[in-house]
Image (spheres, helix red, strand yellow):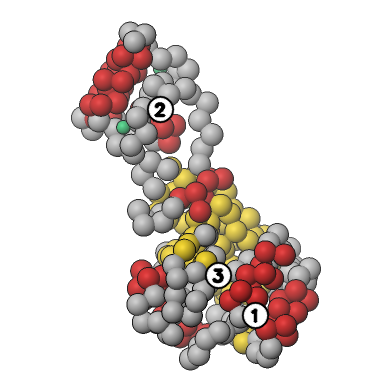
Amino acid sequence: MDDYLDGVRAAHSSDLIFISYHVNWPQANDPYYLYNSAESNARRTFYGVSAVPFVAMNGAEVSGSQTTIGNALINAIGGFSALEISATGEYIEWNRAGNVTVTLDNTGTLSGSYVLRTALIEENLYYMGTNGHPNHYATMRDMIPTANGVNVTLTPNTPTYVDLDFAVPEAIVQENALLVFFLQHPTNKSVVNAMQIAIPSLMPDCPNPPGDVGGDMVVNVQDIVQIVSVIIGTTSPEGCMIQAADLNDDETINVQDVVMLVSMILGN
Ligand SMILES: [Ca+2]
Ligand SMILES: [Ca+2]
């Protein structure tokens, strides 16, 4: 079943968004369950799952043969949604934190209470489970801010905006991480729409060169003053400043970076 769904997913990667919640069976020590068992359990309980494999679509279980399940997913592609989800924001690789503004563009008649849920998922995990399935995709690592999501009240023909702060913990490979946003009805569990955004696409494209801590596009003695002020805490570093200051790319700004900057300026 897992292999089959992986195939469906690969064949329709631009149309289908998956989130894989790992549970404690058949294997109680599944590392992706143990990593965030509280939120995996919260999602399992929400859907009333008591056995796996379990596929939920629009809040309801899709059961039957794997072909039946796969076809149900494929047939849902292209379905109309009166609400579009988009997100913009910034993620700073260095401090592994970011912020996004999610727009729920309600161009139709949807109204009332919904829940915006956001999952931080990780692709391309490898762990040989007791079920013989080693490759794990779209694995839920964290729910932002929690598995409860954010309650929103929709008004017809009116966009709703949700601001979210998030972090990508050390255990997760940033380049393989994505945020999945989905708007869900709180009781019938139907999903109005979903979208996902890759974490690397939120990383700022810095115009300033390495060493240009001040951001004036020139690397000179002023940048030494600026990097020192970052280190002693006089300046709180932001996006491109951080990237330019961390010259040895070890995700820390310290005296080693100052040494490199000085030698850069001296032309050594
Ligand atoms: Ca500069
Ligand atoms: Ca450094």
Compared with residue 90, is residue 183 higher up or lower down, i.e. above or below?
Answer: below
Local secondary structure at mark 2 = helix
Q: Choose top left, top right, bottom left or bottom right for residue 263.
A: top left
Sequence-wise first label, 3 or 2: 3
Number of numbered discs visible in the structure rendering: 3
Q: Which mark is residue 244?
A: 2
Q: Choose top left, top right, bottom left or bottom right for residue 84.
A: bottom right
Q: Residue 186, image x and y in percent?
A: 55, 80
Instruction: Confirm or deny contact between disc 1 and disc 3 (CB under 8 A).
Output: no
Sequence-wise first label, 1 or 3: 3
Sequence-wise first label, 1 or 2: 1
Cβ of mark 2 under 8 Å from ligand 1: the answer is no
Residue 45 is left or right of residue 16, and the answer is left
Q: Choose top left, top right, bottom left or bottom right for residue 77.
A: bottom right
Compared with residue 132, is residue 212 higher up or lower down, i.e. above or below?
Answer: above
Let me know if residue 152 appears in the view. Answer: no
* Label 3 CA crowd tier, 10 Å (few <14, some 14–19, many 20+): some
Residues 179 and 134: in front is 134
Q: Residue 125, image x and y in percent?
A: 48, 62
Name the residue: 21% across, 30% down.
Answer: 232
Residue that carries the numbered disc 3 in the rendered image: 19
Local secondary structure at mark 3 = loop
Let me know if residue 170 appears in the view. Answer: yes
